[in-house]
């Protein structure tokens, strides 16, 4: 495992970078990628940025995100090193990973406790609230001046992964870095508006339908919601536009585990998980082939239906919580 200072030194040995982040990218994914990309460019480096699925509309304000190209557009042989951000395993960058030439060094920078350590070099720090926090440390160690563009990138990364500095991963360091980024030109209220208050009417209509599916198990400790593929096509929505819905299930008093089951466009069932108690949903998701953090995680299952997926997931949740199933 490398420290952020070591990673800064290793990065500076290279000149042509491919930076990659995970599928269905969130604010931390795009913010940390753009922040690192812009920082390396300030150091005169060549940078290609990519992620499976592209940049969601509400994150397109992030400076540098306009440089992100689709995996198909990544020119082969135009980079000497790959930096993978915010991804606990290489399945998260499916579509890009297959194109990386064998023997190419990989630098893995991530804050998921479930990270598999797949890099040639690994800077994995689960005490960091966001990958953006790690990128901030690396840029400082590389002697990159944090300008307003980089400040916006990294503030967005950290703010979105901490629910604007209120989730349990928020530390004094997170707040200090946040304050520094505001001093350097990030505007918290403007960023909040761009990220959270630019939803389509359809996505809010969908929230209405999905909230209608909200149910509690008999213990009252588990809440879940369902999203059907048919609804998604009716309202012409993609999965990114249901981001954050699962948080509503966690709001119910007494709920310890919140789940959302989604019929995904790829035919699988995608499950989002949140915890408000002692249950480590990251560890739970890992047993199901996914990953994440103790209080926010996810996975995809090959189940034929939401009810089949529910059976599997609820079995695991009941077991972990020591509850009797139905
Ligand atoms: P969200 O529910 O917001 O999409 O994801 C919550 C957290 O779980 C994020 O940190 C995300 O990276 C992680 N996560 C979600 N789905 C998966 C998955 O299928 N595999 C892995 N490894 N992590 C996931
Ligand atoms: Mn993250």
Image (spheres, rainbow, N blue to C red):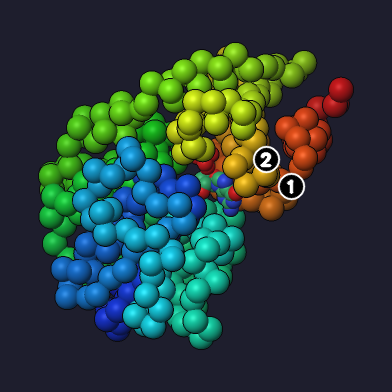
Q: Quadrant of the C terminus?
A: top right
Residue drawn at x 36%, y 27% is: 199
In the rendered image, residue 233, in percent from the top left (x then y), is placed at 55, 31
Residue drawn at x 25%, y 54% is: 66
**Residue in front for this viewpoint, 307 or 284:** 307
Q: Residue under circle 1?
A: 302
In the rendered image, residue 38, in percent from the top left (x then y), is placed at 22, 62
Q: Is residue 220 left or right of residue 77?
A: right
**Residue 26 visible at all:** yes
Q: Residue under circle 2?
A: 269
Residue drawn at x 76%, y 42% is: 303
The secondary element bearing badge 2 is classed as strand
In the rendered image, residue 130, in percent from the top left (x then y), is placed at 40, 49
User: In the rendered view, would you say 162 is above or below 62?
Assistant: above
Q: Is mark 2 within 8 Å of ligand 1?
A: no
Q: Is mark 1 within 8 Å of ligand 1?
A: no
In the rendered image, residue 173, in percent from the top left (x then y), is placed at 32, 47
Whole-angstrom CA distance, mark 2 to mark 1, is 6 Å
**Residue in front for this viewpoint, 228 or 152:** 228
Q: Residues within 10 Å of mark 2 (few under 14, many from 20)?
A: many
**Residue 129 visible at all:** no
First of labels 2, 1 by sequence position: 2
Q: On residue 23, which mark appears?
A: none
The secondary element bearing badge 1 is classed as loop
Q: Is residue 50 left or right of residue 317?
A: left
Q: Is residue 144 left or right of residue 69?
A: left
User: In the rendered view, would you say 56 is above or below 121?
Assistant: above
Q: Tell me if label 2 and label 1 are in contact, CB under 8 Å.
A: yes
Q: Which image quarter: residue 81?
A: bottom left
């Amino acid at each position: 495992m490398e420290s952020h200072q070591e990673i800064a030194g290793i990065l500076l040995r290279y000149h042509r970078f491919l930076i990659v982040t995970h599928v269905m990218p969130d604010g931390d994914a795009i913010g940390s990628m753009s922040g690192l990309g812009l920082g390396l460019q300030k150091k005169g480096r060549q940078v290609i940025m990519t992620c499976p699925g592209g940049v969601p509309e509400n994150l397109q304000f992030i400076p540098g995100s306009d440089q992100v190209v689709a995996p198909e557009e990544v020119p082969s042989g135009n980079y000497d090193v790959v930096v993978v951000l915010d991804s606990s395993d290489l399945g998260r960058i499916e579509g890009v990973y297959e194109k990386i030439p064998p023997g190419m060094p990989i630098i893995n920078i991530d804050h998921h406790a479930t990270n598999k350590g797949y890099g040639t070099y690994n800077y994995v720090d689960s005490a960091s609230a966001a990958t953006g926090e790690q990128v901030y440390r690396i840029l400082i160690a590389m002697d990159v001046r944090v300008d307003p563009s980089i400040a916006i990138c990294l503030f967005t990364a950290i703010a979105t992964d901490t629910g604007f500095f209120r989730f349990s991963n928020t530390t004094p360091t997170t707040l200090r870095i946040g304050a520094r980024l505001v001093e350097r030109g990030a505007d918290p209220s403007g960023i909040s508006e761009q990220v959270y208050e630019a939803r389509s009417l359809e996505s809010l209509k969908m929230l209405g339908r999905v909230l209608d599916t909200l149910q509690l198990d008999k213990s009252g400790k588990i809440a879940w919601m369902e999203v059907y593929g048919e609804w998604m096509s009716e309202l012409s929505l993609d999965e990114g536009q249901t981001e954050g819905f699962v948080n509503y299930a966690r709001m119910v008093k007494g709920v310890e585990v919140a789940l959302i089951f989604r019929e995904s466009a790829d035919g699988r069932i995608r499950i989002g998980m949140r915890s408000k108690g002692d249950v480590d949903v990251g560890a739970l998701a890992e047993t199901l082939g996914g990953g994440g953090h103790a209080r926010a995680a996810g996975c995809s299952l090959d189940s034929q239906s939401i009810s089949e997926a529910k059976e599997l997931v609820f079995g695991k949740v009941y077991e972990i919580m020591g509850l009797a199933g139905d």
